[in-house]
Amino acid sequence: MEQLNAGLDRLFEDPQFENAHWGVLIRSLKTGETVYARNERKMFMPASNMKLLTSSAAAVALTPEYRYVTRLVTTGSVKDSVLNGDLIIVGSGDPSISGRFDSGRVTITFEQWADSLKLLGIKKINGNIIGDDNCFDDDDYGSGWSADYETDYYAAQISGLCFNDNCVDITVIPSATLSGPCSLSVSPATSYVTLVNKTITAAATDSVNDIWFERKRGTNIIIVHGIMSQGKRPWIESVTVENPTLFTAAVLKEVLVAKGIAVKGSWADVDDLNDTIRYDSTRQLASFTSRPYAELVKVVNKPSHNMYTEQVFRTMGRERFGVGSMRNGRAAANPILAGWGVDTVRLRIADGSGLSRQDLITPNDIVAILSGMSKEPSFTVFYESLPIAGVDGTIRRRMRGTKAEGNVRAKTGSIGYVRNLSGYVTSADGEMFVFSLLANHYTVPTPQVEKVQDEVCVRLANFSRTESK
């Protein structure tokens, strides 16, 4: 053990990190012994290591079997194939209405709803398509999120009613005409967003591929800039939308019309109505039930999906206190965290995903979460949701060709000048260690930080108590 500790000291005390902050804690799950510690009770920005907190607490608070249910109801009645009244989508906070689990068929849920309406004999709707997102509060973004993020898919707006990750997917293809604008298309095909094409097609010999996107704040006008050479493969980018609730209602209307159901009215947000909807007098026409949390949590952790995480965090609050919000989510999560030994008094939870630089946590708290989860009935679901070194998720290209490959299950965390890795690794003689390796305020290239973290994991994977005696 002394040899292991001495080697780890040399890694973290490398002069290239003299202006950086390392927070490290490695503990044996078998014995509870602290194997190595460095600044383990100091606060660090966790970045997406925050998802460990959210996904574990939700595995307990919601259970792996938890499913969202989104309902399609009406205030009216059907006569002569006409629905006289509004059609209302009642959100549940579900992040998964998309093509993610249906081979990319983005509007499949809405198509199924249209088929359900047709089976009820509905050919026309004399009313509006209304989105109800009131299961959550109206905070669209996490506390401390930068305004610079608003166009980017990883900072999609949070809403009680979501569709397609609250983004549109834009495809850019170079023109056959030199100097002409590139071809743009959007999925789902919708008039809810307006594309402004400011691209130029360059000659193949120039080998240029420089495209960027800008959504004007508070609008759904998306400007596509840049240059793309002929012969380049299509560029596909997810860009956020303003007001996911209206987006959902708008696309549903478009799908209904495409499926042969006329809609007289427009789309609307329930908050903009003059009258309050009395749900006790509505009739349910269709619904959508999500995959269980055991599957959704894999989207949270393996690709590190911020929107899914924020939705899940607020859902904990909704299920406990009636309305989804950060405040209620914290109130639901804190007793679980405290039960694992997390210092919830000093812990700072600004958002659920770690995109905020206002989040603060210690390596000791992260190890407490990982250790606490190892004793929960839902541990297997949580453990299997984590990226696997050299195999999948955000560490699929790391630690390949070592004993850590296929062994380490860990969550990355990355924002500016922050690179973290926390999770589980099994030693050469079968002992599982839990670890948290947090690097903040470094100015060396990020791969240098990852190299140290990977080396720690490899040493733990190779470690044997028998050989160290």
Image (cartoon, helix red, strand yellow):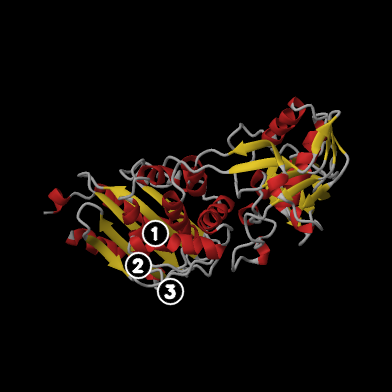
Nearest to viewer (mark 2 / mark 1): 1
Residue found at the far left of this picture: 469
Q: Earlier in the sequence, mark 2 or mark 1?
A: 2
Instruction: Tell me which residue sits at (67%, 45%) in the image.
Output: 163
Residue in the image at 64% along x and 40% along y: 98
Pick whichever of labels 3 and 2 is earlier in the sequence: 2
For residue 358, say whether it is visible: yes
* Type of amino acid at the residue the image marks with label 2: Asp
- Rendered location of residue 277, percent (x, y): 74, 52
Rendered residue at 72%/32% (across/down): 111
- Coordinates of residue 122 in the picture (x, y in percent): 80, 30
Nearer to us in this view, 284 or 8: 284
> Could you say which quadrant of the image residue 344 lies in?
bottom left
- Quarter of the image where the C terminus is located: bottom left
Dot 1 amino acid type: Ile
Q: Which residue is mark 1?
A: 336
Q: Amino acid at mark 3?
A: Asn
According to the image, label 3 marks what residue? Answer: 19
Q: CA distance from mark 2 to mark 1?
A: 38 Å
Q: Is residue 369 left or right of residue 137?
A: left
Q: Is residue 366 left or right of residue 467?
A: right
Residue under label 2: 14
Residue 173 showing in the rendered view: no
Tell me if residue 419 comes above or below residue 400 in the rendering. below
Q: CA distance from mark 3 to mark 2?
A: 11 Å
